[in-house]
Amino acid sequence: MKKEVKSSVPADSEVVLGILNDSKETLSRLYTSYFPMVLQLVLKNNGNEDDAKDVFQESVIVLYNKVKAGNFELNSKLKTFLYSVCRRLWLKRLNEQSKTIRNVQDFSEIIAVEDDLEKHEEKDRQFAIMESALQQLGEPCKTIIEDYYIQNRSMQEICEKFGYTNADNAKTQKYKCLQRLKKLFFQT
Amino acid sequence: MKSDLELTNLIDAYLKGELTGTVLSDFEQLRKSDPSFDMKVVEHHNFILNLSDYGSRVKLSSDMNIIHESLNIQAMKDEVAPEAPKHIRLWKKYRINTAIAASVAFVAISATLLSTGYFSKSISTNVNLLRREINSIKRSQNALIKNINDKPAKGPADPGEFGGTGFALSTNGYLVTNFHVIKGADSLYVQNSEGEAFKVKLIYIDPAYDLAVLQITDPSFEKLASLPYSFKKAASDVGEDVFTIGFPRDEQVLGKGYVSAKNGYAGDTVAYQVSIPVNPGNSGGPLLDNRGNVIGIINGKQALLDGAAFAIKSSYILKSIEAIPQDSLEEKLVVNKKNTLAGLSRKDQFKKLEPYIYMVKVY
């Protein structure tokens, strides 16, 4: 029993452009257009909606990384790409839970995404290490680092936020924090 | 030489594009001239990239979570994967278990039936063994008849619970009947055509051939005149006219028919199939051919099928008799070999046979 899920789907090139521009609207349309398909896949294959959410969000991350790395070639439909990634991720997860599924109920064609997933796994590892390193770093270092390097706030803003007497003090603090973070990061 | 702190701040500023003018050109000059410094910049840059990757992923995740929360997941679920009715879901979920349970049950039942010999028994379930259950109505009738006739009661006053037929093997009181007739008997009596009952003793049973040999031990029993029939050793042919005398009721009944097949039920080589009217009570009755040779002993008929009765071949009766240890017998069992019935009409044959055929009563 296959059921085609219909909704207004954004053009693939539009999505790629939106990803490069960090457009929230693109993300939203991408999410609402393709999540039902993945929900269907997971629900019909031994999973629940939370599994579907995890798998789908991971596939979007894969897509974003691929697009932002600049080597995204639109040689298949975006839908097929996302579906294939999700399918792969979900089967892998089922396997990890030592649940085997004899025949997967499919709702779309699939393409090989093994290379992308390998890259993604590497990134995932880095992400996990960074996450734990930042966690161990503690406050106020974590916030200073995040504000400066991730939010791209200026030293002046940080200085005011944390009540440092001058920017040099803040810079010294930031430097110390960064050194500790590097240490934690490369340790693991 | 600048301190590490200053250098790091400088690199940060450079990467953020905050350097201008001479500072920027000095910086680039230093990168070109000092490979170790250049390496430091690249390293730092990579780390910062890593950090920003982390940041963007966290942001993406949180953005997606916000979007996810705004969605109506339940409606979506209903659309993409409508829940099947409960019994179908349960069936899908448990069908493997069900199949396994069913197979286990099947194997267990088969094994039980096999080990209890059910399958071998089932062959005979289609055969009605013709021992008669003497019901209470007949019982009261008998009592009435006895009262009216005021005959001196010999043997037990009560008719047996089961009845069959038996016939004499020798003049000194040996009889043969079916094993199933006397099976489970507390005590056994036989009654002749004149209504005289004698106590009998079980001498020998042969359940495989459904045969039993009895001996009349009653003191009132007088030796019989020599037997008019002999036992045929060879097998009879299909089509041979045969007749039997039995006690389907409290009186001898003659039945006439022919041998209709060489083998009995389900290819049983011990018996013939005989087309002859027989009823419960006929079991153990002799099956004789026209010349008055005993060719078999009636033991059953096929349920739900008319005209298919079965009779154990006479050769097996002789075999059974041979198997009896003669030493254990009080009196010698000599099977009659002389036939005086040949050539007589059926009426005369019947008259001659009458005294040798007994009703077997089982208590």
Image: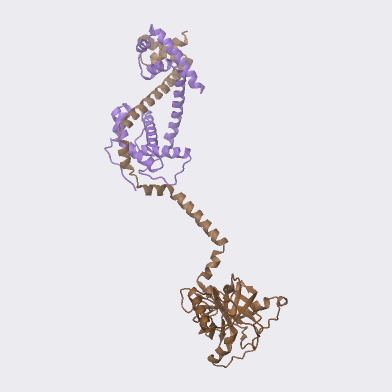
Can you tell which quarter of the image residue B271 is in?
A: bottom right
Tell which chain the image draws in purple.
A
Which tint is chain B?
brown
Across and down, in percent, residue A103 comes to 42, 47
Question: Residue at image x 47%, y 11%?
Answer: B4
**In the image, B326: left or right of A40?**
right
B317 shown above or below A184: below
Q: Report the colour scheme.
A: by chain
Q: Residue furthest right?
A: B327
Question: Residue at image x 51%, y 76%?
Answer: B139
Question: Residue at image x 42%, y 23%?
Answer: B50
Which is more toward the observer, B5 or B75? B75
Which is more toward the observer, B10 or B145? B145
B38 shown above or below B212: above
Which is more toward the observer, B179 or B127? B179
Q: Residue furthest left?
A: A8
Asked whether residue B76 is in view, the answer is: yes
**In the image, A134: left or right of B356?**
left
Across and down, in percent, residue B267 comes to 54, 74
Across and down, in percent, residue B19 comes to 36, 12
B163 shown above or below A170: below
Across and down, in percent, residue B291 comes to 58, 89
> What quarter of the picture does the C terminus of chain B occupy?
bottom right
